[in-house]
Image (cartoon, rainbow, N blue to C red):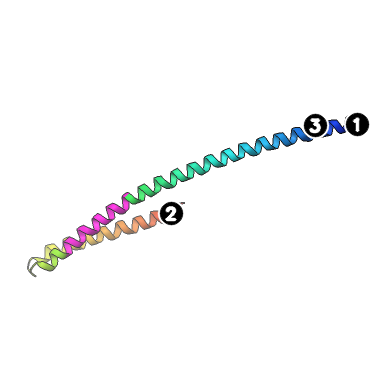
Amino acid sequence: MASKSKVTSGTKATSSARMESEFRKLGKNLDALIVKTRKAEAEARLKYASQLKTLKAKQAQAKKALARLGRRSVAAGGPLKAGVHKAWSDLNAAVRAASKRFRETP
């Protein structure tokens, strides 16, 4: 019976060592995924920051066009009003598209 006990003890030790090894590998894989996720998050933040910068520029253009419209006479207002309307429409569409992309991002 003593030999059977040694075999069982040796098998348990081998199994335990194997499990520890697998656990370490799993931990390394998890760490790698965390690094990948952080990198993806940083890249997404940069991408969205760039898009938001573009939107802010469009907003500034629309604001300037609106200010020009306020300074112009009624006669000159027609073409200017059309330009303001287009700037507003473009800005509104861009903001909606960016909002949709932000919601869709996993």
For mark 2, what is the residue?
Answer: 104
Which residue sits at x=65%, y=39%? 23
Return the residue found at the far right: 1
Type of amino acid at the residue the image marks with label 3: Gly
Q: Which secondary structure lies at badge 3?
A: helix
Please report whichever mark, 2 or 1, sits nearer to the chain's N-terminal start. Answer: 1
Distance in Å between CA atoms under marks 3 and 2: 53 Å
Contact flag, marks 2 and 1 (Cβ < 8 Å): no
- Which element type, helix, strand or loop, lies under badge 1? helix
Q: CA distance from mark 1 to mark 3?
A: 12 Å
Q: State the separation of the CA atoms marked 2 and 1.
A: 64 Å
Local crowd size for mark 3, using a 10 Å CA cut-off: few (<14), some (14–19), many (≥20): few
Crowdedness near tag 2: few (<14), some (14–19) or many (≥20) residues, C-alpha within 10 Å: few
User: Majority secondary structure of the magenta segment?
Assistant: helix
Check disc 1 and report the residue beneath it: 2
The quarter of the picture where residue 68 lies is: bottom left
Q: Name the residue nearer the viewer: 46 or 71.
A: 46
